[in-house]
Image: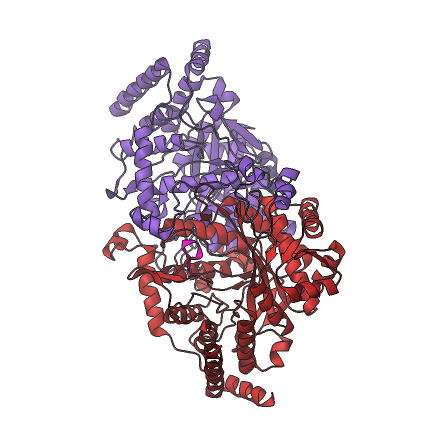
Chain colours: A purple, B red
């Protein structure tokens, strides 16, 4: 333990200033958008309580069932029926916000309250770029996206399975992913959730990096536990949940809901079911380890009822997001939802329209942890290189937006208004000169030139400009220094685990 | 008069059902987003009152100055200094909402209150389509856009100068534009504002179409009076304002503000100035004709302080829009702002991102009249054919969004939730089947197919799909029947005016 502590202190002292601008997490101090009043919200809450107590939630794992029973939950034929009072009691044990550790402590993040955290896309088996088109993702792609996330001042988190490294064996993939997050970034990252065994490996690697005691004080891992809606938690996710909550690592309990398939087509019904599912998962987590950090997650969208394909950025999902955000606030829980979603295969106009249609409500609704905040394409099946860097431009805008309005005398600027004659201009006023650099967010990848100039410069699409940009970024990348003894320990652990897993 | 009334009644009886779906204006019954509290809003109001009383607004037209003086305003060196009490008194005379007539009465629109109206882009001298690129707009383009706006169920208004018909002489262009709105659409439209004389022509044409008395009851024209910020109303706009308000036709008083150029770089200062300018214009209108319908307008965006070019969709403009919307509500006035703004020259990802960044806040902030809701490209210098039809898809989404959430038992859908087993699906439930057609808004031009299917179908961008769509629409277009005697009267008037204007 003390050896690790010494290591850590030493590492921090050695770390030189990185190339990454230290822009902090935005604080959402603006009024939050509430879609419904308290009686309407209560109607959904009550419907969820009815689902939890009468209709029930399936937990397809024996030990979880035993834990639920021990704590007074009725379980019959794998289905748990919860007393609403029990739900309220255990949900109340979860902290309203918590800090997730980064190996660079300046990049620790707060999840919950008024804090917003943007994290990259999660899960795509494919990648897309203009030059090579769509192809299976590799570990090299994974590392590229870790680097791009590290380089963006507007991404606060290295994410999890940014892409699936399909060239790595499934059983040991998680080891290389966690190592890549640690090696190529110094931002916080997520643990694997495919099985309890893999989750345990991720916890061990976090212990090597941060120290066993340190990660019991503040979690070093934040992991995504998906509920297989409708009303079902599977054994592998439950195994991972048990490992993480026992190690006091944070989990995001997230029903994955396509309305019309995994839930009713109606917004209220979808949210009532989703809410019941989240609360069931959080209750189990708090029974396992009271006070362990959890996040209320909601991944919800609709399907195209003609083809069954998922649809992103639609109006029904915006409504559902606002309702879920209000419910999470009602329970005093950190909330995860939103993202730059699109069904488009490429970074075209559809990609832009749909991304903001799903992302802006997440910002307005004060979502605390926004996964998929950059790089999402093709309904989540592909991570786009160009999309990633373009999405980051928008994340910069949200940082500026969340600063709100300056109501000081300087903000009201009556002296400047007085100084400029009718029909004159403010370009050279003392006020303008003083605020020149910070007045407006400037999106580097958006073109503001005249049509003629844009033509002269090659008539590039936004995606073509982004193509150049991501290559420049990867070329400029410098890894944040990592203590070689920690790197060695991690490598040793990975080698040992690969041998064990191979033998099994 | 009675001849006209008979005509009109007859015309209405003759009109067959059109091909255009009669989707009504959306009602914004959701909670409106208020960015600031009352004391903060009052700080802006007070700053505006200081601008109006101490710094003053220039009215560069003699009769307007005389009217102001008659009503107790102090005018020195073309600059009017308003007593705040006088402002409050006259602003209070403006109606909170009003109906604008359409020649098909089913398409009359309400402006103000909780009603939302979407209108096409206004003013571009260029058009863009994928096949022919960027070129000067013609009357044929103007008519094409009138047809596209007519064909969209999500556009409630035919707009004004959708594009500048540059192949028509400047002095008589307004006659052909108004005639095209009347001939090719039956939705409400806007009047010309280049001069008092042109405004008078527009009023006469509206009188021919609707009847002299009819348009005194409810306005047939809604016209855009731009204020030349900072703090200046020019003679030509004032002439048009006088004509319209005397004829009791509605005007939108809109400062055109690029922060950093026409106003301070700060949001609060920009809004304080803009608010003062609008209130000055509205006060004059109410002095001319108390109770005449007016709209509080705010066209505000920022500039790129490196190049001086306008920037659209930025975070500062969103904040300003919310503040202006709150101020308009404070004064009880209908509000105009927002639009599908972008600086992009084409319908690419930048076009999509920026459009929603500026449009969604307009919907959330309950803007009553959203000009530029479809077709805007290149900072307003070009109208895009592909952009127009894609923007309309989003307008459809906003219609659905504004319906809000169904909190009935059927909306909560507990029976459906109960009927589906854990891990099952809702695709075939009775509840899903019953709501199949209306559950989700479906954007025809967005691709939800698999990557493989999308490849097989030509790997089209959203803009390429939109290119096909707008051509199909124009091909399918059928004009709404127009009473031949009215058409003849209009044509006679236009011929007479062209002769007079040519002789002058």
> Residue B232, how many percent across, how many down?
60, 56
Answer above or below: position of A469 versus B87: above
Residue drawn at point x = 39 percent, y = 67 percent: B166
The N terminus of chain A: image quadrant: top left
Q: Quadrant of residue A123?
A: top left
Count of marks, rendered view:
0
Q: In this rendered view, identify the residue nearer to me: B41 or A482.
A: B41
Q: In this rendered view, identify the residue nearer to me: B415 or B394.
A: B394
The C terminus of chain A: image quadrant: top left
> Residue B120, how many percent across, how many down?
46, 64
User: Is residue B389 in sight in this rendering?
Assistant: yes
In this picture, residue A35 sits left or right of residue A6: right
> Residue B212, how many percent across, how many down?
60, 81
Answer above or below: position of B131 versus B146: above
Q: Which residues are magenta?
A: B373-380
The answer to if B375 sits in the magenta stretch is yes
Q: In this rendered view, identify the residue nearer to me: B499 or B385.
A: B499
Residue drawn at point x = 45 percent, y = 10 percent: A6
The answer to if A59 sits in the magenta stretch is no
In this picture, residue A124 sits left or right of residue A412: left
> Residue A81, how many percent across, how many down?
53, 42
């Amino acid at each position: 333990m003390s050896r690790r502590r010494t290591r850590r202190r030493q590492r921090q002292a050695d770390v030189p200033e990185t190339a990454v601008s230290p822009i902090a997490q935005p604080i959402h101090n603006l009024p939050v958008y509430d879609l419904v009043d308290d009686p309407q919200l209560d109607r959904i809450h009550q419907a969820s309580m009815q689902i939890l107590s009468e209709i029930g939630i399936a937990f397809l794992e024996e030990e979880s069932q035993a834990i639920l029973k021990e704590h007074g939950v009725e379980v019959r034929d794998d289905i748990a029926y919860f007393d609403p009072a029990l739900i309220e009691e255990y949900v109340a044990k979860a902290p309203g916000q918590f800090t997730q550790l980064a190996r660079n402590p300046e990049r620790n993040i707060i999840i919950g309250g008024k804090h917003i955290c943007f994290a990259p896309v999660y899960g795509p088996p494919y990648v897309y770029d203009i030059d090579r088109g769509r192809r299976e993702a590799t570990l090299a792609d994974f590392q590229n996206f870790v680097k791009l996330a590290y380089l963006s001042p507007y991404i606060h988190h290295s994410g999890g399975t940014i892409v699936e490294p399909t060239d790595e064996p499934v059983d040991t993939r998680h080891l290389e992913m966690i190592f890549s997050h640690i090696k190529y970034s110094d931002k916080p990252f997520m643990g694997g959730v495919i099985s309890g065994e893999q989750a345990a490996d991720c916890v061990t690697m976090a212990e090597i990096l941060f120290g066993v005691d340190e990660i019991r004080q503040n979690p070093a891992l934040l992991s995504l536990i998906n509920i297989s809606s409708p009303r079902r938690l599977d054994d592998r996710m439950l195994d991972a949940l048990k490992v993480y909550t026992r190690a006091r690592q944070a989990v995001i309990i997230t029903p994955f809901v396509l309305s019309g398939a995994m839930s009713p087509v109606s917004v209220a019904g979808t949210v009532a079911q989703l809410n019941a599912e989240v609360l069931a998962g959080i209750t189990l987590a708090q029974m396992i380890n009271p006070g362990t950090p959890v996040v209320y997650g909601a991944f919800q969208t609709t399907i195209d009822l003609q083809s069954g394909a998922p649809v992103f950025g639609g109006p029904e999902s915006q409504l559902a997001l606002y309702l879920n955000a209000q419910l999470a606030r009602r329970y005093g829980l950190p909330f995860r939802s939103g993202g730059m979603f699109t069904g488009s295969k490429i970074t075209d106009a559809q990609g832009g329209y749909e991304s903001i249609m799903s992302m802006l409500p997440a910002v307005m609704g004060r979502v605390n942890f926004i996964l998929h905040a950059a790089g999402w394409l093709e309904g989540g099946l592909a991570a786009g290189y160009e999309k990633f860097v373009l999405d980051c431009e928008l994340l910069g805008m949200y940082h500026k937006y969340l600063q709100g309005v300056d109501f000081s005398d300087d903000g009201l600027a009556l002296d400047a208004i007085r100084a400029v004659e009718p029909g004159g201009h403010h370009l050279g006023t003392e006020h303008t000169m003083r605020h020149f650099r910070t007045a407006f967010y400037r999106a580097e990848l958006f073109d503001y030139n005249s049509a003629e100039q844009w033509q002269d410069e090659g008539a590039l699409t936004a995606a073509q400009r982004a193509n150049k940009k991501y290559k420049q970024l990867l070329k400029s990348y410098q890894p944040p220094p990592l203590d070689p003894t920690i790197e060695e320990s991690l490598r040793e652990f990975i080698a040992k685990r690969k041998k064990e897993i191979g033998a099994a």
